[in-house]
Amino acid sequence: MSRKVDSVKDINDSKETWRLVVRIMDVWSVVNNKGIEHLEMIVMDSLGDRIQVLIRHDHLLKWKEVIKENMTCIINNGSVYNNDFQWKVCDHSKKIVFLGGTTMKATKLQNIPPKGYFFKDFGEIFQGKCKTDRLEDIIGAVSEINHIQSNTPGKKVVVSVVLKDLKGNCINCNLWEIYGSKILAYYNDPKNNGAIVILLTHAMVKDGQVSNAWSGSKLLINEDIPEIQDFMLPTNEQKEKPTQSAKSLSNWSGGSQYSPVERFVHNAKCMSLSQFCKIKHETLCVTVATTLKFVVSKYGWFYYGCTRCSSKAPNPEKAYECSCGQKVEQPIPRYKIEIYVSNGESKYRFVFWDSECAAILGMTAEFMHNSMVENGEDDLMVCPDELEMLLNKKMAFRVKVQPTFSQASVWKLCDDEAFVKEIENDYIVEDNQSKTEYAKLVPNKENLETSAQTLYASGENDPESIILMTPAKDVVIADKGEEVDFEASGATQLSGTKPSKKLKIEPSS
């Protein structure tokens, strides 16, 4: 005789010989701080009841390639324990742990509801009607990107967006690391226009805000699934991409008395591109220009650098210890792209470095390089098509003009239309004088000018001391100290008030 099927709601710790007919709603991998991996999943029976399942490390190889999301199956035998997960995905008080004697047979079953989501109402989040240890599914239209934090030493990538539900309620959603990079890569892609609807599974809820979990969350953006398509229908009034707030255009301290534009131009000479050819000494400038075309050089579009900072590796094929203290086993590709920019009849060569390019392109140089190799492209002097996203963009630039090399090294940039227009209209003039006095915002201008003149730019190394910059629309690379080109011996940063010297890397805030 065949054993009868048990209901998920009846599972308790009185036995281990449970027989369940279920659909695997979700499955994910968890790696602890010791590097040990295990699997977790949620299963649901025909009555719609769910329970969380744990597959320990010692059973991982047996099940990892067998278990597939959305499959229906029969599971026999498993230990039952109290659901003591720090973060719970369902309300069941118990969890199942696979045993050596657990079996699972995939079978097609029609009586189990299809994979679905259990969305948390934004109103309930506002009212605090949330369990503090419960992960929720969230869906909403992105109405604004209000904060971007780059990946710098001591800081993780995080992108904060405002989500709006069908009732008009708005909540803040913080997307960390790969989730933040994914939303900005999508936003940054010129092929993606109109409203953006995101679905985030296993979201943590705290203090009226939501964020992705470190393990298990999935981020779906405008995907062709019923939940997102049904949600998008009422959002047709938002036909344009969500905006970026001024707050997201700067990583400056929130307590600053200056606006993002003022901080962008501070201590720099604001001038038109036509005046660059008249500069005789290295000068910190702000200008507005449009990216025109790539400059083809013998160095290609990337260089090999440290895995921690952005200094150039002495040999791309050898391990070494970087001046930043990092022991580099294998140097990684980092962007260094030369682009002609123009404004009217004037043209000048700008050097774009790793973090700015990654921000616009939505991917690291290492990822792009590896993709080329995987696709059979062995000539790494070939510029990937994805680099075209850097062209035909009108931006405000904060650059170090280097007349010795007939180039300008990009320190910061922004392509937000209102931001660019304000700089162009209020700061750029044609008489080689800015509309605000030079160093108006920083009284110790003598020290800055002195230190700037002592710097030598080889034109071969990335000035950014950043591991990875998140992709961003309307990008500002802001307040990373005053980065400069540096010699092969390592990176230097320029303080606004002290002579140049090697400094401890200070991440963006």
Image (cartoon, helix red, strand yellow):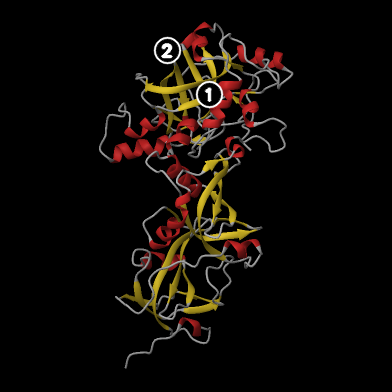
Task: Please give the name of the residue rendered at 54% of the width and 27% of the height, measured from the top-left corner.
Answer: 420
Farthest residue to the left: give it: 376
Task: Please give the name of the residue rendered at 32% of the width and 33% of the height, measured from the top-left corner.
Answer: 385
Q: Is residue 323 above or below residue 3?
A: above
Q: Residues within 10 Å of mark 1 (few under 14, many from 20)?
A: many
Q: Is residue 244 above or below residue 477?
A: below
- Label 2, secondary structure: give it: loop
Q: Position of residue 11 (x, y in %)?
A: 50, 83
Question: Which residue carries the number 2 mark?
Answer: 345
Q: Nearer the viewer, residue 37 or 492?
A: 492
Residue 221: assigned label = none
Q: Can see residue 323? A: no
Left or right of residue 304, residue 261 in this image: right
- Label 1, secondary structure: give it: strand
Farthest residue to the bottom: give it: 1
Q: Position of residue 292 (x, y in %)?
A: 39, 22
Tell me which amino acid carries mark 1.
Phe
Give the image quarter of residue 382. top left
Q: Is residue 278 above or below residue 202?
A: above
Quarter in which the C terminus is drawn:
top right
Tell me which amino acid carries mark 2.
Glu
Q: Nearer the viewer, residue 145 or 456?
A: 145
Quarter in which the N terminus is drawn:
bottom left
Question: Which residue carries the number 1 mark?
Answer: 397
Q: Position of residue 296 (x, y in %)?
A: 34, 20
Q: Nearer the viewer, residue 119 or 34?
A: 119
Q: Can see residue 75? A: yes
Cα distance, mark 1 to mark 2? 18 Å
Task: Please give the name of the residue rendered at 51% of the width and 21% of the height, measured from the top-left corner.
Answer: 288
Q: Position of residue 37 (x, y in %)?
A: 47, 60
